[in-house]
Image (cartoon, grey):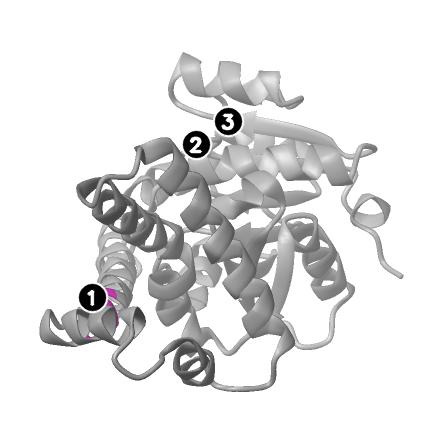
Amino acid sequence: MITVDRVAKTIAVIGAGKIGSAIIKSLNECCREVRIIATGRRNETLENARSLGAEVTKDNREAVRSADLVILSVKPHHFPVVIKQVGSNAWGGKIVVSVMAGIKLATLESVIPNAEVYRAMTNVNALVRKASTAIATLNSNSEGRLVVEDLFKCLGNVYWVPEEYLDIWTGLVGSGPAFIAEIIDALVLGAVASGMPRDIAYKAILDVLEGTAVLLKNVDSHPAVIRDEVTTPAGTTIRGLMVMEEEGVKSALMKTVEAAYKRSAEIGNEIDLRIRKELNIL
């Protein structure tokens, strides 16, 4: 079995924000022998990364130069700045993984020379090592694939997918925790409106969510089968489902994921054009 620390003794996390910090936390719990260097623009970001066990610096070039494996987790519109700061000579021979929304492998490879490049999308559930991460690469036969997979298994489940799915994955999984949190809050407020204290309702719906997820993972059937098992003639559930249909909840959720997917693709196109203009590679 390939382990992260066999190939990557030092990992640089370029951009230790929300996702970067979640990755640092999971890696420190999973790969204690790995040295982690984190970068950030703000002192608060660096202090948080230090509290999670990383060495910290504002020098992106030095962090990349010192690392065997680099995780790019800056906001997409900051990526061209990072490329200018690091230059073209520091990437050679390294494994580079982008978790930036939308930015395509072709764009990454055009500005990160002589590196083994991967594109991944995870989510904030990495904080509790329950993330779902999709990874794509053009490197079909490389030891680096096993290292990258091993790294993201520290965060949760890993799926290798064609790159064409990654923007959809971003809309469904990357943004998914926010959508689900909003749904949970709405259900809790419904209980509050009906007379239940918020703290009880909140704990209860989290139990329902967790239990339903486990149930669906353990039965080989469509979610509608579970729905129908709960729904009895003239009962409470069907009345609630009727309201969901009347209010267009299912359609709204479908459009929500679609809108997030389209924005991810737009971001990729915007950054690609900006990089090509700024670096004169049109």
Q: Quadrant of residue 260?
A: bottom left
Q: Is residue 114 above or below residue 218?
A: above
Residue at disc 1, secondary structure: helix
- Label 3 vs 1, first from the N-terminus: 3
| Residue at image mark 2 | 17
| Residue at image mark 3 | 39
Q: Of residues 148 and 189, which is closer to you in this image?
A: 189
Which marked residue is nearer to the observer: mark 2 or mark 3?
2
Q: Which residues are magenta?
A: 251-256
State the quadrant of the N terminus.
bottom right
Q: Residues within 10 Å of mark 3 (few under 14, many from 20)?
A: many
Residue at disc 3, secondary structure: strand
Residue 215 lies in the magenta stretch: no
Residue drawn at x 59%, y 41% is 128
Residue 259, numbered label? 1
The amino acid marked with disc number 1 is: Ala
